Structure formats: structure tokens, C-alpha cells
Image (cartoon, helix red, strand yellow):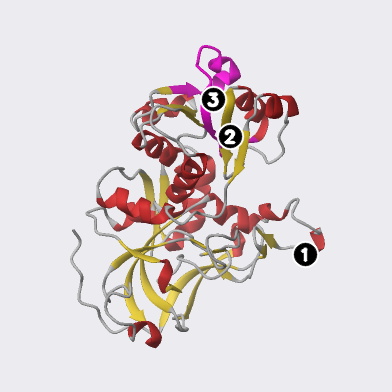
């Protein structure tokens, strides 16, 4: 367990990596800024570590704007216009250093984190409640964790009691909650055959572990050079992406396909699902445009599920898995925050297995 350290007086300024617009790495500017000012209902965190995700890069490149409306509305994010200049960073492991007055005044037992407590932030915030699909995302809709300090709503802060390092914890929120949300929505149960594409990436490697935790039989699809690393995560079968759909021929049909890859492999994956099975996705790293044979969909009574907004049980469940040591982190490398452009270049090269993390 990590002891609560004695806190020093807070500085008045901090460093942050600011994304000033859509474009290349020149849009990433390391700046000195004032500390965030707390509004009612907020807490201030000292950022201990922050993970890198596809969304950070996609937002900077303007990828989410395609197909979402009039191009004249650009720059678009997944919730509309991106509020540049923006401090990105959806993954935050932090330490509570200040509470807004109304938060500090709440009675004991009201769920307010203690000063000095180590926490994770729920990146996906359901602003209209869990019955509505509306979301706000840390580091996409408002300033995130690529900074020395970040302010967040108190209800999105979760204490975590674990001997995992700050870097290991920071690898979790976005990738692992996204993977858990897909498995939750698909209702994955023990004994089911679950196929996971992109199994060496942050979401894919998390999905392999989380599906195994549920007792599923997992077939993982990855590149040949990462086969051993993915097998070590617990996958029952590992297929090489280079072999294409021919590798599916001798396998039993999947009950659930967890696919964040999309692109040209989509059609073959859909054909690999049993009648009455399910395809679930939250991304498209190999391409957003896919070929769909409608006969595969309706003649096989398939269910297709798109996932962005996280359901209510997902993040609390994930915290529990960590505290009970039911999963293990997979950090490929860590970088200093000021070197974020180098980290994003490494992320895009896709030579790593697991997650990349930044340290202020």
C-alpha cells in the first residue's frame, strides 16, 4: 500500500502540454500556466502519471470529425467542437491536494476523498445520468491530465487501495474501462468463445485479461512478432493477423467478437460469429469504412453494439479488480510529459504491447 505523504504548500503555477489546434506534433506546446481554479463540486489533483490513448492523437488530428456533420463546423471532436487550446489526457492517476469549499463542507461518509489520497479519475462522465448517452470526457471536452495538476468533479474520483505503482494505475482508466464496458454490454459469461482483435494494444490486451477473468475462452488476434506476449496474457488461442481470415477456418464460431480494429478485416470477423452472437466495438484503428454484407447480419440474428459511454458498474468494478489483484497492469514504457511527441510517435508505431504512460 502507498502511504499518504505529507503535502507541501501548493504552487501558483504548473507545467502542462497544451494542444493548441488540429494538426501535427507542432500543435503540442509545453507551457507554464496558472493552477486550475476550483469551482463548486470539484477537487484538485496533483497528477502522478497519465496514460496515452488513441483518442489523444485522433482529437489532435481531427479524425472524429469525419462523417459527423458539416465540415464547416470543424475542428470537431466526438462531442462536437474541440475546445482548443486544450490540455488533453484522459487517464489520470493523481493525489488529492485541494477540495472546493462546498466539497470540503460535506459530512463524513459523503464519499469525499481525503486530502493526500491516491485516486483514479473516471474519464467518461455521464453528465445527464446513466440512462442518457450524453458524455463529457476528461482531456477531450475539458482540460485533462497532461499537466502537473488537474481539477475534476468530485463524483468522478475513485480512491484505489493497491500496491500498483502510479504509472501502472495510470495505464488503466480509458483502455481498461473501455474494454470492460464492451464485455459488460455484450454480457460475456463463463465458457463463451470471445475473439479479441488488436490484442497487443491497450484496449485489446485489457480485453484479453478481462474476458479471461469472466471465464471466457479467448482467441486473440495480433501480429506475429507479438504472439508470445499476447499468449502470456492468458489467451487460449493466438492467431497471427498476417495469416488473414484463413486462420479462422478450423476454429469454432465466436459467441462474441470484441473488435477495435475495423477496416478490411471486418467482413470476415462478422462471418466468424455464430448465429445469435454479438459483435462489439469502440474503435476503428485500421479504418472506419467497412464492408457489411447485410445477409450476415439479419440471417444470423447478430447483435452489433457500438460503445462509447461507460455504464454505471464499469469503473467501480474495475477498481475492485485492481484491489483484489484479479488483473495485472501491462505498461510498455513511460516518458516524461515534456517528451509527449516522442511518446505519441512510439504509440503510432505499434511496436509495443500494452500501454504507454507519461510522468510530469
As helix, strand or loop, the secondary structure at mark 2 comes to strand
Identify which residue is drawn at 70% across, 24% down. Answer: 299
Earlier in the chain: of badge 1 and badge 3, it is: 1
Earlier in the chain: of badge 3 and badge 2, it is: 3
The percent position of residue 163, horizontal first and vertical second, equals: 22, 54
The percent position of residue 269, horizontal first and vertical second, equals: 60, 26
Q: Quadrant of residue 10?
A: bottom left
Q: Quadrant of residue 266?
A: top right
Q: Of circles 3 and 2, which is in front?
A: 2
Q: Is residue 353 visible?
A: no
Q: Is residue 193 visible?
A: yes
- Circle 2/circle 1 CB separation < 8 Å: no
Q: How many marks?
A: 3
- Span shown in magenta: 238-262
The percent position of residue 256, horizontal first and vertical second, equals: 52, 31
Q: Is residue 51 above or below residue 263?
A: below
Amino acid at each position: 500500500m502507498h502511504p499518504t505523504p505529507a503535502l507541501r504548500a501548493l504552487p501558483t503555477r504548473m507545467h502542462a502540454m497544451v494542444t493548441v489546434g488540429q494538426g501535427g506534433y507542432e500543435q503540442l506546446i509545453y507551457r507554464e500556466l496558472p493552477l486550475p481554479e476550483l469551482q463548486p463540486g470539484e477537487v484538485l489533483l496533483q497528477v502522478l502519471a497519465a496514460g496515452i490513448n488513441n483518442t489523444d492523437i485522433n482529437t489532435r488530428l481531427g479524425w472524429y470529425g469525419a462523417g459527423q456533420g458539416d465540415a464547416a463546423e470543424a475542428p470537431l471532436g466526438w462531442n462536437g467542437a474541440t475546445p482548443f487550446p486544450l490540455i488533453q489526457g484522459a487517464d489520470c492517476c493523481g493525489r488529492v491536494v485541494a477540495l472546493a469549499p462546498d466539497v470540503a463542507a460535506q459530512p463524513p461518509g459523503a464519499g469525499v476523498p481525503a486530502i493526500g489520497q491516491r485516486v483514479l479519475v473516471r474519464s467518461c462522465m455521464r453528465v445527464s445520468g446513466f440512462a442518457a448517452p450524453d458524455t463529457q470526457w476528461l482531456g477531450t471536452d475539458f482540460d485533462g491530465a497532461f499537466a502537473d495538476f488537474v481539477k475534476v468533479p468530485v463524483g468522478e474520483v475513485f480512491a484505489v487501495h493497491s500496491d500498483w505503482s502510479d504509472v501502472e494505475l495510470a495505464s488503466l482508466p480509458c483502455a481498461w474501462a473501455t474494454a470492460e464496458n464492451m464485455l459488460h454490454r455484450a454480457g460475456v459469461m463463463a465458457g463463451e468463445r470471445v475473439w479479441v482483435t488488436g490484442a497487443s494494444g491497450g484496449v485489446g490486451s485489457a480485453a484479453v485479461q478481462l474476458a479471461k477473468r469472466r471465464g471466457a475462452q479467448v482467441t486473440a488476434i495480433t501480429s506475429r512478432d507479438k504472439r508470445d506476449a499476447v499468449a502470456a496474457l492468458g489467451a487460449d488461442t493466438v492467431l497471427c493477423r498476417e495469416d488473414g481470415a484463413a486462420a479462422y477456418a478450423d476454429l469454432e464460431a465466436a459467441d462474441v467478437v470484441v473488435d477495435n480494429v475495423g477496416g478490411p478485416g471486418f467482413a470476415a470477423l462478422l462471418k466468424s460469429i455464430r448465429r445469435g452472437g454479438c459483435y462489439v466495438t469502440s474503435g476503428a484503428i485500421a479504418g472506419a469504412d467497412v464492408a457489411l454484407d447485410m445477409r450476415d447480419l439479419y440471417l444470423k440474428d447478430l447483435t452489433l453494439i457500438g460503445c462509447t459511454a461507460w455504464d454505471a458498474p464499469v469503473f467501480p468494478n474495475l477498481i475492485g479488480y485492481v484491489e483484489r489483484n484479479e488483473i495485472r497492469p501491462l505498461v510498455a514504457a513511460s516518458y516524461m510529459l515534456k517528451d509527449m511527441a516522442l511518446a505519441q510517435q512510439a504509440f503510432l508505431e505499434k511496436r509495443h504491447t500494452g500501454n504507454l504512460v507519461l510522468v510530469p
